[in-house]
Image: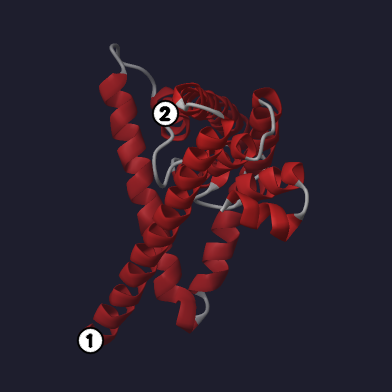
């Protein structure tokens, strides 16, 4: 996978940034690719962090307008409704997790910011800047309140992934073995991302069919 991307794009650093911007792959895939391609730890982190963080701005400002536009188009209304519902559920879950982690009663705004941070900071499937920014949007956070938890959370997620990548390299018998292991991890991320995308699309299709049957 690493060599395929290298051959496709031709520049490892540019490839790292591009991968980091891609939804579902994001920071996790960017760092793993960069380390597997032989880019040093600091550059791997910085390139992946900058690429993935850049996604915050278009998502924050364009997500709701695009969804509202799609709702006006008959063929895409169910699709837009499903995406909106998905992000609202994610936002509710992030809020609940934040309140559960808080020891003292805080303002709603505090929990919204904390929930957004935790969602982005913990590098799990379907988390990251893209979804985390959408969570912030549907929690009703303003730009000045959303940007800090997203960028700091992304920094923490990058640190965690970087440490895990370095552990893999340290435990490997040599550089070639480490590269092979990171390559398999990258394959796994792509497969997982594809599977999650397919599941999401199937849910959207099933919702359209259910709505049609209801009529």
Local secondary structure at mark 2: helix
Residue 42 relative to residue 178: left or right = right
Residue ID at (61%, 34%): 35
Q: Residue at x 54, y 23 (%)?
A: 159
Residue 192 appears at what percent x and percent y? Answer: 40, 53
Question: Which of 36/56 is in front?
Answer: 36
The residue depicted at 69 percent of the width and 52 percent of the height is 6
The vertical placement of 129 against 81, above or below, is above
Could you tell me which quadrant the C terminus lies in?
bottom left
Q: Residue at x 33, y 49 (%)?
A: 89
Q: Is residue 168 visible?
A: yes
Q: How many marks?
A: 2
| Sequence order check, earlier mark of 1 and 2 | 2
Give the label on residue 156, or none: none
Could you tell me how far apart the alpha carbons at marks 1 and 2 are, in whole angstroms?
39 Å
Identify the element where label 1 is drawn: helix
Up the image or down, 6 lies above or below 29; here it is below
Instruction: Judge whether residue 128 can be spotted in this image.
Output: no
Task: State the image quarter where residue 144 is shown.
Answer: top right
- In the depicted view, which residue is nearer to us: 45 or 24? 45
Does 79 appear above or below 10? below
What residue is disc 1 on? 213
Return the x and y of residue 57 as percentages of the image width and height: 66, 44
The residue indicated by pointer 2 is 118
- How crowded pointer 1 is (Cα within 10 Å; few <14, some 14-19, many 20+) is rated as few
- Mark 1 vs mark 2: in front: 2
User: 94 above or below 107?
Assistant: below
- In this image, 18 relative to 64: left or right? right
Residue 107 position within the rendered picture, expressed as x and y whole percent measured from the top left: 39, 21
């Amino acid at each position: 996978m690493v060599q395929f991307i290298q051959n496709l794009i031709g520049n490892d650093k540019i490839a790292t940034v591009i991968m980091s911007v891609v939804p579902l792959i994001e920071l996790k895939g960017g760092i793993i690719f960069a380390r597997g391609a032989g880019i040093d730890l600091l550059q791997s982190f910085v390139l992946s962090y900058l690429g993935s963080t850049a996604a915050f701005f278009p998502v924050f400002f364009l997500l709701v307008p695009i969804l509202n536009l799609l709702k006006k188009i008959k063929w895409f209304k169910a699709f837009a409704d499903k995406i909106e519902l998905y992000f609202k559920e994610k936002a509710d879950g992030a809020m609940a997790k934040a309140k559960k982690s808080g020891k003292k009663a805080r303002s709603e705004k505090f929990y919204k910011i904390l929930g957004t941070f935790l969602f982005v900071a913990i590098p799990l499937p379907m988390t990251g800047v893209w979804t985390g920014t959408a969570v912030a949007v549907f929690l009703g956070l303003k730009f000045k309140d959303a940007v800090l938890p997203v960028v700091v959370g992304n920094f923490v997620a990058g640190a965690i992934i970087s440490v895990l990548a370095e552990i893999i390299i340290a435990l490997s018998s040599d550089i070639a073995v480490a590269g092979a292991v990171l390559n398999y991890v990258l394959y796994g991320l792509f497969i997982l991302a594809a599977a999650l995308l397919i599941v999401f699309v199937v849910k959207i299709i099933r919702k359209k069919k259910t709505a049609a049957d209801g009529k």
